[in-house]
Image (tube, rainbow, N blue to C red):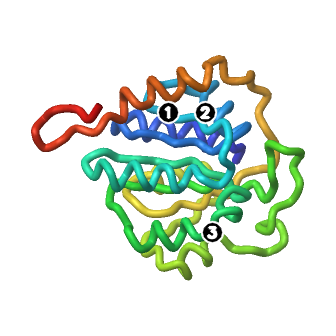
Amino acid sequence: MKRIEAIALAVEAAAACGALLVCNIGYPSRELFSVKDRPENFYMLGSMGLASSIGLGLALAQPERKVMVLDGDGSVLMNLGTLATIAHHAPENYLLVILDNCCYGSTGSQPTCTKLGTDLFALAKAAGAKNVREVLRVEELAPALQGPGVVIVKVEEGNADVPIISLLPEEIIERFIRCARLVLPSGKSRP
């Protein structure tokens, strides 16, 4: 399946349950923006490797809110410690979706270690994650997006021909923060 197809199904699932959605840098964010822009989407414009960590922090800070992260194989390989931290905390409201195209798609499609045999499913399990699923076909993806854990989605190499995100970084963060505001036990929003 194409990455943009996987992203379309993921954002549909996120929108259906009102989930906050953090997306990896580069083309994945651009593809998400072109498929379905929504204020609950956080488009990473830098900080490669940190989408999973940012999403985990959101999930831990807001246990009543579903959080989904769309990350790439290259980014997860850059921050493997995140898999152990996710496994340790295992929040019931957190889903990490790793879009594995076996390359660094946003920088010229150089091969990642998954092309050379590194198995992200096995790494997530070895890190202690209990709920790990692997998706090879598009029809398997929608059911795999239900519930918490880690989903590794095998996608084709290549980027969709989509425009650059037309929002300023300040606009992205400001509207996302408005959607992601913490509600305190008193019922007041955190500043």
Q: Secondary structure at mark 3?
A: loop
| Residue at x 73% of width, y 23% of height | 164
Q: Earlier in the sequence, mark 3 or mark 2?
A: 2
> Quick check: 53 above or below 164?
below
**71 shown above or below 43:** below
Left or right: 89 as drawn, with respect to 120:
left
Q: Check disc 1 and report its element: helix, strand or loop.
A: strand
| The label number, if any, that marks residue 41 in the structure image | 1
Q: Residues within 10 Å of mark 1 (few under 14, many from 20)?
A: many
Identified by mark 3, the residue type is: Leu
Which mark lies nearer to you, 2 or 1? 1
Q: Camera-side residue: 2 or 112?
A: 112
Of the pair 9 and 77, the residue shown nearer to us: 77
Along the viewing direction, whichever of 116 and 75 lies nearer the viewer = 75
* Residue pointed to by mark 3: 80
Mark 3 Cα shell of 10 Å, populated few (<14), some (14-19), many (≥20): some
Please state the horizontal and vertical placement of residue 88, each as a whole percent of the image.
Answer: 41, 74
Kindly state the secondary structure of the residue where label 2 is placed.
helix
Q: Residues within 10 Å of mark 2 (few under 14, many from 20)?
A: many
In three-dimensional space, the C-alpha distance between marks 1 and 3, rounded to whole angstroms, equals 23 Å
* Alpha carbon distance from label 2 to label 1: 8 Å
Residue 167 visible? The answer is yes
Which quarter of the figure has residue 33?
top right
Asked which quadrant contains residue 30, the reply is: top right
Instruction: Residue at the far left: name it.
Output: 186
Which residue, given by chain and number where applicable, does mark 2 sit on?
A: 32
Residue shown at 64% from the left, 35% from the top: 29
Circles 2, 1 touching at the beta carbon (< 8 Å):
yes
* Residue drawn at (42%, 53%) of the image: 57
Nearer the viewer's eye, disc 3 or disc 2? 3
Residue 95 image point, x, y percent = 45, 55
